[in-house]
Amino acid sequence: GAGVSQSPRYKVAKRGQDVALRCDPISGHVSLFWYQQALGQGPEFLTYFQNEAQLDKSGLPSDRFFAERPEGSVSTLKIQRTQQEDSAVYLCASSLGSNSPLHFGNGTRLTVT
Amino acid sequence: GESVGLHLPTLSVQEGDNSIINCAYSNSASDYFIWYKQESGKGPQFIIDIRSNMDKRQGQRVTVLLNKTVKHLSLQIAATQPGDSAVYFCAEYPRTSGTYKYIFGTGTRLKVLA
């Protein structure tokens, strides 16, 4: 497909489990973003990649959150030792570069029980 | 599916009327702004953007107005249709050294009444 693809669509994890969320950006898009969206809120920035370089991780809430984009294409957001407050929709977006519109995937809804 | 924006400000408009959704942005250094539409269970969808060297930009049935003096952005939707029902977010890009994040507003739910 031509859009941003995220998997899984839904993830249920027990507290303390590790999870990995995948993002396939639009081909050729240099920039990749991860956002967290709580119910009833706007998306909150987590981290930004330019190609394979993670240039901004100021939004990651704790050292349990880790993101990578090793070949400058697919990205993975990993959350270790999940906690209930991690429950949210995790959105991935890609763009051609700065000052360009972000194109979002449909997100992964994470529920931690 | 899940609901987006259960406790968001809501704008209710009659089908066929024009809608105006407002947004106050925070950073005077922001030089790029985007409006997004988010339907339940989906990611935000790009509607229209505007750069800070412009005051107005028009798309198909949508117009964005930018007032830099009071840091205000608005989205006007002409002849609102049932398919326009969604949550609308504005986003700003503050050109600040060392940060690359687009900052999103809290959102407004638009309900179109038949």
Image (tube, coloured by chain):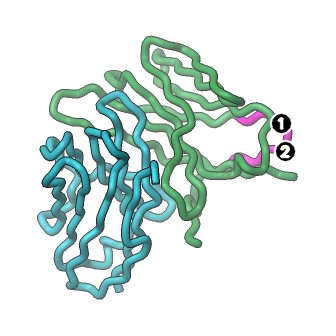
Chain colours: A cyan, B green
Residue at image position (38%, 31%) is A100
Q: Residue furthest top?
A: B53
Q: Are marks 1 and 2 on the same chain?
A: yes
Residue hosting label 1: B17
- Magenta residues, as a range? B11-19
Residue at 21%, 60% (x, y): give it: A61
What amino acid type should be assigned to the residue bearing mark 2? Gln
Pointer 2 residue: B14
Q: Tell me if residue B32 comes above or below residue A96 in the rendering.
A: above
Task: Report the disc number at residue B53.
Answer: none
The residue that appears at 35% across and 25% down in the rendered structure is B30
Image spot of residue A50 (x, y percent) = 20, 40
Determine whether, in the image, residue A105 is placed left or right of residue B60. Answer: left
Please determine whether, in this image, residue A64 is positioned above or below residue A55: below
Give the total number of marks visible in the rendering: 2
Q: Are marks 1 and 2 in contact (CB under 8 Å)?
A: yes
Q: Amino acid at mark 1?
A: Asp
Q: Which subunit holds the residue at mark 1?
A: B
Nearer to us in this view, B74 or B61? B61
Query: Is residue A106 shown above or below B92?
Result: below
Mark 1 closeness class: few <14, some 14–19, many ≥20 residues within 10 Å:
few
Res. A15 image quadrant: bottom left
At 51% across and 60% down in the image, what residue appears? A40
Helix, strand or loop status at disc 1: loop
Q: Is residue A1 left or right of residue A69?
A: right
